[in-house]
Image (cartoon, rainbow, N blue to C red):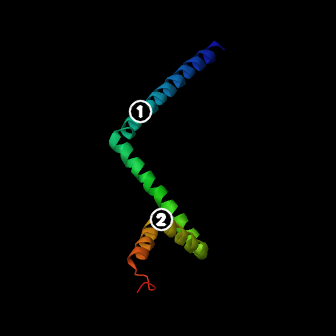
Amino acid sequence: MMMPRKNDKILNLRNLAIDRDQALANLRKDTAETRKRLKPANLITEAKSKFARRVQKTGARAINVVRVNPGLTATVAATATLIAMRKPIAKLIANRKISEPNPIEE
């Protein structure tokens, strides 16, 4: 009965060595992939592609909202335009009042 125990120990040690070698190989592979991924040029490329995907998703969502609610979208767009143009419109009105002759005075 002593032989099988000795063989089991040897087999266990051999399996441990194989597992260690596999873990070391995996670690080396992962380290090489990580180094490659963390290069500045690769990080920039990855960030650009993620940003592009997010912009596409946001644009698609916006288009869907416009399609579902065209009236509301037009109202919001018109309101935003008026708010953005309020100073130029006010200047135009102010200049027009000053430059127009008063019909009563003539």
Picture coordinates of residue 40 (x, y %)?
Answer: 34, 40
Q: Nearer the viewer, residue 71 or 19?
A: 71
Residue found at the far right of this picture? 1
Q: Give amino acid for label 1.
A: Thr
Q: Secondary structure at mark 2?
A: helix
Question: What residue is at 33 percent from the left and 43 percent from the top?
Answer: 41
- Residue assigned mark 2: 84
Q: Is residue 22 left or right of residue 2?
A: left
**Vertically, is 57 above or below 81?**
above
Q: Tag count in the figure?
A: 2
Picture coordinates of residue 38 (x, y %)?
Answer: 39, 38
> Which of the marked residues, 1 or 2, is nearer the chain's N terminus?
1
Which quarter of the figure has residue 75?
bottom right
Q: Nearer the viewer, residue 44 or 103?
A: 103
**Vertically, is 15 above or below 54?**
above
| Label 2 crowd (10 A; few <14 / some 14-19 / many >=20) | few
Q: Give amino acid for label 2.
A: Ala
Picture coordinates of residue 59 (x, y %)?
Answer: 49, 64
| Label 1 crowd (10 A; few <14 / some 14-19 / many >=20) | few
Q: Is residue 93 left or right of residue 6?
A: left
Q: Are marks 1 and 2 in contact (CB under 8 Å)?
A: no
- Residue assigned mark 1: 31
